[in-house]
Amino acid sequence: MIRKNRNIDRMSTQDIGYVESWMTFQYVNTVFGLPEDYLRTQLGITDPTYPKTTIAKYAKRQKLDRDSFVESLRRVLRERFITPAE
Amino acid sequence: MLGFLLSYLLLYKYLVLFLVVAGASFGFPIPATALVIAAGAFIAQGYFDFAGIAICVFFASLAGDFSGYFVSRRFGRDVFARIGLSKVLRSARFRNIEKTFAKHASASVFLTRFLATGLGPGTNILAGLAKTPYWQFFGYAIAGEALYVFLFLGLGYAFGDQWEAISAIAQDAGAIIMLSIILVGLFVTLVRVRRTRR
């Protein structure tokens, strides 16, 4: 599922549930209007392919459970939208 | 399959979109229309720009169409002969199909670009085998693909939130409209045949 950019200002935590593993970090950054390094910092990503890699590929490379990683990414986004930093 | 293609669309953008759309127009069974609708949604989100995607989809569709048409026109009869089907091409039934297609070539080429797009590759092959004039095939393919680009990118842009549902509805609606046109055509032909028999 894809959400529209024009709703970003009022992005609800429910919208964050639409983040899926086929998406790239770059795409998530664009759609949610995040600074490029935000997810890297929050999730402790050191992979050099960030942000031009999919969430699924990253989880596989790091031997992480894909669904758990997607859930932790959603959690980071929820925290961001509850307390916007910038 | 679609999730896999969407990942590659996000990663390699225009290259993937071009290859998928051209491949589907040529005849490979790839869900290109769903990808085009998704690209429309990505435009609405600010991830892609409209002009770049529209140009990419337009030229990719034409590349696939023209390749299918050229290959069929240039090698179609030889291939049929090599696989032992040259009799089919010489049969009265195939000549009738060719005649009927020649009568409605413009409409067939134009309509299958954006309605029941699954019939597009078959139409390209038939147009090549029937040696439909270049200008006729090119002209109607260009017009039809221009409509395809604006229709499906526009659907994705307008209904970004529900692009998956819209993609399914658009393809079903296209198939229903195309089937209706074929049924009306068959009905009219049947009525004419009955009249001439009387």
Image (cartoon, coloured by chain):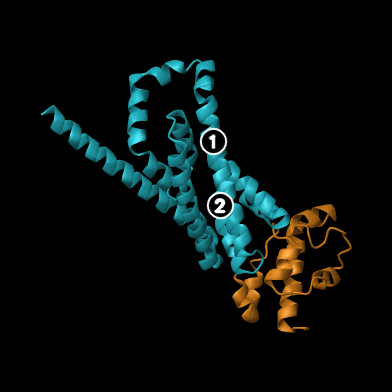
User: Badge 1 sits on which subunit?
Assistant: B
Q: Position of residue A4 (x, y in %)?
A: 59, 71
Q: Quadrant of residue B29?
A: top right
- Asked if residue B198 lies left or right of residue A56, the reply is left
B72 w.r.t. A3: above or below: above
* Callout 1–callout 2 Cβ contact below 8 Å: no
Residue for point 37% across, 29% down: B98
Residue bearing mark 2: B58
Residue bearing mark 1: B68
Type of amino acid at the residue the image marks with label 1 = Gly
Which quarter of the image is occupied by the C terminus of chain B?
A: top left
User: Can residue A39 be seen here?
Assistant: yes
The secondary structure type at the circle numbered 1 is helix
User: Badge 2 sits on which subunit?
Assistant: B
Q: Position of residue A75 (x, y in %)?
A: 74, 72
Q: Nearer the viewer, residue B31 or B165?
A: B31
